[in-house]
Image (spheres, rainbow, N blue to C red):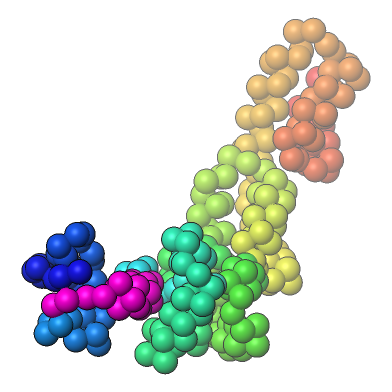
Amino acid sequence: MKILKYKKLSRGRYKVTFDTQELILYEDVIIKNNLLLEKNITISLLEKIMNENIYYEAYDNALTYIEYKMRTEKEIKENLEKKNYSTEVINETIDRLKKENYLNEDKYIEAFVNDKINLSKDGPYKIKRSLYDLDLNIDKINNYIDNIDENIWDQKLEKIIEKRINLMKNKPLSTIKSKLKIDLFNLGYDNSKIDYYLNKIEKDDSSIIEKEYDKIYNKYSKKYSGVPLKLKIHNYLYQKGYNTEEINRIIDKNEY
């Protein structure tokens, strides 16, 4: 086979035109095999070149994959597996990335956690679970997150609670606290810390329950009276999240 011409492409690649076919080869492969001087290629040399080129191609694909976002070893392996590279090629690519410091668990954990703190509502336990799923070193994950200033988590919690309360301002306090407790736990915050901040919430539900009472009274009083009416009102308000003490107070206040 004879090399007829080269055409430079992006990312250190060349389109090499042979007398029988065209191949995309990486510059390092061309130089390593002295193709700029050697114009006549044997079949065995061509096979060698193509095999070597696969390694450079996998490495280039991995670099493209991590160009805009840090990746873990697991993510890179899965990405290369989808492109049908062999285990040998993938492992060699991973080793090269590590040697060139493109794969650094400490830096990845730091960047991941800082992004979650600044760009999400996630708490420490949810962040840990996300990192565990990436097959990173558990001790490194725990050590980094456990040494974060507690004030950071406190500020995030307070901000989330404040926003949620504003969104649920027409709900009774008991409903707000119950919903917040579940949501904050799912976001990965510590139970004792959640309870501490929820216990600090104060809210006057008197005007809200008054409106609810008036609405349901006007509806049910057309069909019921006496004890049946009282039970209907009680059950309705209870389902809305008001406790028995609040319900009895409003019913007694508006005794009919």
Front-most of residues 105 and 175:
105
Q: Quadrant of residue 150?
A: bottom right
Q: Position of residue 68 (x, y in %)?
A: 32, 69
Q: Residue at x 43, y 80 (%)?
A: 93
Front-most of residues 223 and 197:
197
Q: Position of residue 208 (x, y in %)?
A: 62, 37
Task: Identify the magenta region.
Answer: 39-58
Front-most of residues 34 and 167:
34
Give left or right: position of 207 versus 107: right
Q: Return the residue found at the far right.
A: 227
Q: Residue at x 79, y 35 (%)?
A: 238
Q: Quadrant of residue 11?
A: bottom left
Give left or right: position of 239 versus 16: right
Q: How many marks?
A: 0
Task: Name the image quarter holding the N terminus.
Answer: bottom left
Q: Is residue 56 magenta?
A: yes
Whether residue 105 appears in this view of the structure is yes
Q: Residue at x 83, y 11 (%)?
A: 224
* Predominant secondary structure, magenta span: helix
Give left or right: position of 237 versus 209: right
Q: Position of residue 94 (x, y in %)?
A: 47, 81
Q: Position of residue 82 (x, y in %)?
A: 48, 59
Whether residue 49 appears in this view of the structure is no
Give left or right: position of 23 versus 116: left
Front-most of residues 201 and 48:
48
Q: Return the residue found at the far top.
A: 223
Q: Residue at x 62, y 69 (%)?
A: 133
Q: Is residue 1 magenta?
A: no
Task: Name the image quarter holding the C terminus.
Answer: top right
